[in-house]
Image: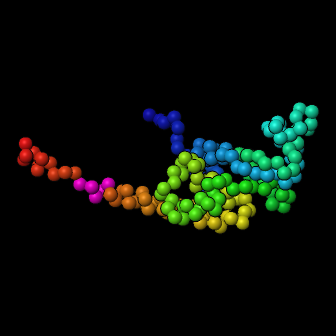
Amino acid sequence: MSEAYFRVESGALGHEENFLSLDDILMSHEKLPVRTEIPIPRLGAFFPERSGGADTDNTIPQGSKLELPLWLAKGLFDNKRRILSVDLPKIYREGWRTVFSADANVVDLHKMGPHFYGFGSQLLHFDSPENTDISQSLLQASNSCGNLWHRTCLRSQLWLPPDITLTQGNL
């Protein structure tokens, strides 16, 4: 019997996403806070409250703060022309990195962002002075959670059921 869905491995931790992976598709639609550095024509059709309305050419003015999907932000980002500047999501900022360095096990990463590691690695495409700190934080959180998983597995293997013969003898 054939399966209706064959799992495609995520490529998010590599250089590019895997466009056949459902996880990567969902990750690429997560919102990223950006600020426009130049007026962007025709993008205002998707943000009517930011553009001049139906009478204008749907231009997003310079300095507008938006939340764009990751795929669109990556497409519009250009270091040479400075179209967008990217603001880090709160989970990747300095305050949260301090929490991860203390103990990443106390943070529910899935609640904060279901694609924490993949999205964080994609943030490294944007030239930010904090890229080194972000990558270190991702690595540290991964190692910390990996150690928790390892300890949990060891505890489950070392747990011994109560001796059944002692229980039966008392009956």
Q: Horizontal placement of 11 versus 154: left or right?
A: right
Q: Count the labels in the image.
A: 0
Asked which quadrant contains residue 79, the reply is bottom right
Could you tell me residue 67's position as x and y percent? Answer: 73, 46
Say if the magenta span includes residue 157: yes
Q: Locate the C terminus and report the quarter of the image it occupies.
A: top left
Seen from the viewer's position, the closer of residues 15 and 131 is 131
Residue at figure coordinates x 78%, y 48% from the top left:
65
Residue at figure coordinates x 11%, y 50% from the top left:
166
Q: Main secondary structure of the magenta part?
A: helix
Say if the magenta span includes residue 136: no
Asked which quadrant contains residue 77, the reply is bottom right
Could you tell me residue 22's position as x and y percent? Answer: 59, 43
* Residue sitting farthest toward the top: 54
Q: Specify start and end residues of the magenta stretch as a single range.
A: 156-160
Residue at figure coordinates x 10%, y 45% from the top left:
168
Q: Is residue 75 visible?
A: no
Could you tell me residue 103's position as x and y percent? Answer: 49, 62
Q: Is residue 107 visible?
A: yes
Q: Horizontal placement of 165 versus 16: left or right?
A: left
Could you tell me residue 57's position as x and y percent? Answer: 91, 38
Residue at figure coordinates x 66%, y 46% from the top left:
30
